[in-house]
Image: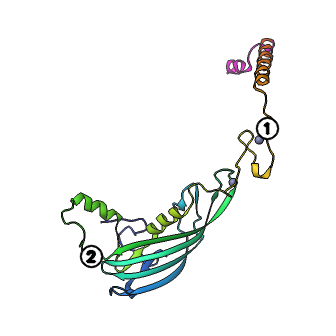
Amino acid sequence: MISKAGNALNGHLDHRNPLVFDTRELGRRPGALKRLTRSVDAPGSPVLGIDGVIGVPEGAPLELDLRLESVMEGVLVTGTARASAEGECVRCLEPLTVEVDADFQEMFSYPDADDRGRSSAADPADDAEDDEDRFFLEDGLFDLESVLRDAVVLALPMQPVCKETCAGLCSECGIRLDENPGHHHDAVDIRWAALQGLAETVQDGEKDNMGGAEPGVDEKQEK
Ligand SMILES: [Zn+2]
Ligand SMILES: [Zn+2]
């Protein structure tokens, strides 16, 4: 049997879970429709979104708009989830907010729905794999969490930026370039740089000769 995130351990859905919906009012007459909206607190652990990149904070308001349609084999659920996701710009690391508008559609089959239309010659192993991806109604209830999570991930940017033109950080000193227009470091002529490097090496060598024993050695000897 399937075991989807959000299902209670005993395998029964909890109708008090805000992401569990009841389809019993709909009846089983194909074509019957029901629309509903629900405002819920975004689930956490893991965050709704792309963990470590951008997501809807746990407990943040999440608006769900659902259309339930009774079809032969179950209930076809079409919907939209709206929320604000928080993350940071991948270029300049400034916090940012993205309005999520995630669409989804999923079939929740009756547990007794047979496999008409599926090849009866199919390998049992294939069947088991297919079942992993199928969603079922349990006593007329379904759990939207898994579908919602996938839809929100797809609706979010993998590489969020504060704005398309964000110039990011200076690769040399790390300051935010958008806040420091014209920022640059004077390019040093490579021949001068080589000479400077040589001069520093000579100075370091003189210091070492004059300084005597290295401090690190003294410390070790004291213990
Ligand atoms: Zn940025
Ligand atoms: Zn810089």
Residue range (magenta): 210-223
Q: Does the residue labelled 1 lie within 8 Å of ligand 2?
A: yes
Q: Tell me the quarter of the image containing the C terminus.
A: top right
Q: Name the residue under label 1.
A: 185
Q: Is residue 68 above or below residue 159?
A: below
Membership of 220 in magenta stretch: yes
Return the x and y of residue 159 as percentages of the image width and height. 59, 54
The amino acid beneath tag 1 is: His
* Residue beneath the point at 50% across and 62% down: 154
Crowd rating for badge 1 (residues with CA inside 10 Å; few <14, some 14–19, many 20+): few
Ligand 1, image quadrant it occupies: bottom right
Point out residue 202 in the picture as x, y percentages from the top left corner. 78, 15
Q: Can you give x and y, in whole percent of width and height, for residue 77 in the image?
A: 42, 76
Q: How far apart are marks 2 and 1 (CA)?
A: 69 Å
Q: Is the magenta stretch mostly helix, strand or loop?
A: helix
The N terminus is located in which quarter?
A: bottom left
* Residue 221 belongs to the span the image colors magenta: yes
